[in-house]
Amino acid sequence: MTAPAIELKGISKAFGPVQANKDISISVMPGTIHGIIGENGAGKSTLMSILYGFYKADKGEIFIKGQKTQIPDSQAAIAAGIGMVFQHFKLVENFTVLENIILGAEDGGLLRPSLAKARKELAHLAKEYELNVDPDAMIENLSVGHQQRVEILKALYRQADILILDEPTGVLTPAEADQLFRILDRLREEGKTIILITHKLREIMDITDSVSVMRRGQMTDTVKTSETSPEHLAELMVGRKVLLRVDKKPATPGDTVLEVRNLRVTDDKGVERVKGIDLTVRRGEILGIAGVAGNGQSELLEVLGGYMNATGDITMNGATLPLIGKGAHGKSRRAAGIAHVPEDRQREGLIMEYAAWENSVFGYHHDPAYQNGLLMDNAGILAKAQEQMDRFDVRPPHPRLAAKNFSGGNQQKIVVAREIERNPDLLLIGQPTRGVDIGAIEFIHQQIVNLRDQGKAILLVSVELDEIMSLSDRIAVMFDGQIMGERDPAQTDEKELGLLMAGMNGEAA
Amino acid sequence: MEKMPHWADIVLIPLISLVLSALLSALVILAIGENPWTAFKLMVDGALMRSSGWGYTLYYATNFIFTGLAVSVAFHARMFNIGGEGQAMLGGLGVALACLYIPWPHWSLAILGASAGAAIFGAFWALIPAYLQAKRGSHVVITTIMFNFIAAALLNYVLVSLLRPRGSMDPASAKFPEATHLPTFRDMFSTADNILFRGAPANVSFFIALAACVLVWFLIWRTKLGYEIRAFGHSESGAKYAGISPVRITVISMLISGALAGMMAINTTMGESERLVLNFTEGAGFIGIAVALMGRSHPFGVFLAAILFGFLYQGGAELALWTDIPRELIVVIQALVILFTGALDNMVRMPLEKMFLALRKGDA
């Protein structure tokens, strides 16, 4: 019987009063892929940080290949054969692939010998694992999928045989994700051990051999993937039965609310980000914009939200909206009946240092209803915020708590509550459930569908294809600043959308 | 969850920093062969134990309240206005012009007019850096400090070439008319048989400074503008999303900041020297930075920090007067206080945060 590649026994870690990991034990056999799934804040990242030497566990032991091992820092983790691929890549953008690979693993003071050695090694790795990357390409010129390969190569170059991947598919197209999984499969065949951290149930079901579920810092269960189901895993994650599908009636679209014609956006670097988009959103329907992050969806939302310059025509209920100059700002957009849940709630939708009640009027703070003579009606806003938080089940329901002290899901609820409460004609909503726990996802999706059923128009942008497919009444796919095509969700599938997201439309392929 | 209680953040940290700087100062005094305890007693005695001492302490504090508030308002919009010195100089010019060329019937009207002059001139001096920052991205730290030098040169020119009375050898304006002289604390609080604040320069503008504290508090925490200023200061991207114009907020908060710095001149120029003199700001614009840092950009904190620095100024003068401790050493002591309360904030904060975390863990 071989020893487990990696075994954790009774790992505990607390940050002040917060018990991030409590008595966690896992054992992963060599040559397997082990999934760790859990909601945000369940303690997955803390556990992996302990394994990679970023944090020191308060209690517990780590065994690598049967040997008890201390991992005080990441150097020790690398020495123990652990490699980590972070969600946000740690690559130097203006270095070549080769330079990035030897970074931190140079032998001696001169670069040339290590580069030559790395080049040979890289060719070998590429052949062995089908990890093809041009060693002389600049990182900034590589696609996200290739950048991720470089991260994997970096770990392999350092002789890692235990690979930890943290939410690896968050930034990939479905096709790129498939490629990644093929690579992981291949690594598994070669005897590497892989730990895959994710919140996507589908990935767990697709590729892992066994899976551990974490909830509130504890390991609730470890099961064989073949003996479980997505519903069962979701229940283990949340602690109650969860509706994974969105429950909605067919749409009954009415008049056109938003009409966009030939919209073009050029960013401050002079790069054209949106290249002539046309779209319409009608009353009582959800138009979903699918696409991999960075293909112009963010810019589209920002233009509609009034804080990005563009050319073209936008009409809202028949009236033209100004695009450049004085009239184009968030305030006038809100006055025109557009509410906006931005993609990044921490950078845009909320002021993290502001209390929940202050955030509850953010963007609408100049509304006379919130003024009391020269001053703001703080008491009134506070009372209203309390009521709003109760209705949207924001936890903890303390309006005086700063936004940064809420979990991702509850922060999002604060934003969604604020925007929906204004009873807008059009709701722009970007990545509504990014970093939001499953329980809150269900709630937020329901709010979006309810708003649609009240006859409001909704423009949904999401990189999660599942979300787009289950919520949208029509799907438009964006690639490279253009709309590649529009599909009826009932008559399309992930494969077709995935191709569109990669820039291949049916006729050309 | 906050790392430690709010009161520890605003009371305990400054207090500990202060004690540390006092201890270090004591060592320095000891090193040059003087008795730190006597020196400390002398400072307290000279600055706080007599009404005339208080008269000086509060006079200096008035300056620091204005410049401290100025820096605070800009801080809330995440801008570092280190041009308080230059803005105050221009404020002085505004005061002088208002006092010299408008025939005021009574000081109470004159102080309003002079305040307006000081505020407008100070705000004007902040406007150009603000505009450059908002429209061109030129950093206000760079532009405001350069504007300090321009202001000094400008003031020099105006005093020597334009405002200096014919025949005077002094680079100063003419004496302001009698009707613009402000009541000092002595005029206000002395009774026939009990003269208070004898010879001290503290005057009615101290109360204007107090009013400014209250107004700034309302502005920052109770008005729409303050809401927007703080939002912009915390997150520019958030402000854009909410339809708050970065250009507008940058310019307005710098205007308010410059106006407050300028208003310092009513205390010095109108209240004390009663004419415009060269270098009347005496570094108060820079002390304002330390005051704002120590006061956590909160008007009440600014008020307390300004009193402290007023005490250091006055106590330091006493030391120079009565001991062999050289004037330069007093600057060292002041610098230590600034260093500990401003720059080394984290040195005290981190262990304290750890301590509070440990305490809370013990409770849990």
Image: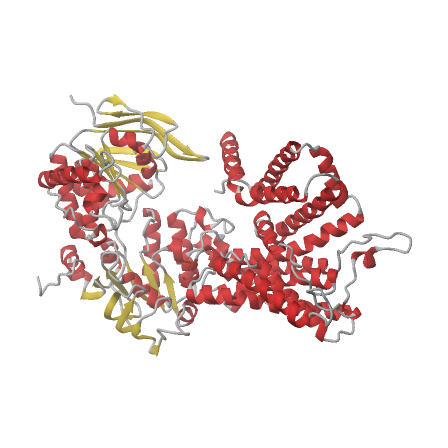
Q: Position of residue A351 (x, y in %)?
A: 45, 55
Colour scheme in use: secondary structure
How many tags in the picture?
A: 0
Q: Nearer the viewer, residue A34 or B284?
A: B284
The answer to whether one can see residue B300 in this image is yes
Residue at x-position 75% and y-position 44%: B321
Task: Indicate whether A133 appears above or below B147.
Answer: above
The answer to whether one can see residue A255 in this image is no
Image-quadrant location for residue A57: top left
Q: Nearer the viewer, residue A79 or A443?
A: A79
Left or right: residue B248 compared with residue B66? left
Q: Position of residue B330 (x, y in %)?
A: 66, 43
Residue sitting farthest toward the bottom: A319
Q: Position of residue B120 (x, y in %)?
A: 61, 69
Residue sitting farthest toward the right: B193
Left or right: residue A486 compared with residue A301? left
Image-quadrant location for residue B319: top right
Residue at x-position 75% and y-position 67%: B175
Q: Nearer the viewer, residue B164 or B247?
A: B164
Q: Position of residue A181 (x, y in %)?
A: 16, 44
Q: Nearer the viewer, residue B257 or B265?
A: B265
Left or right: residue A105 compared with residue A444? left
Residue at x-position 17% and y-position 43%: A206
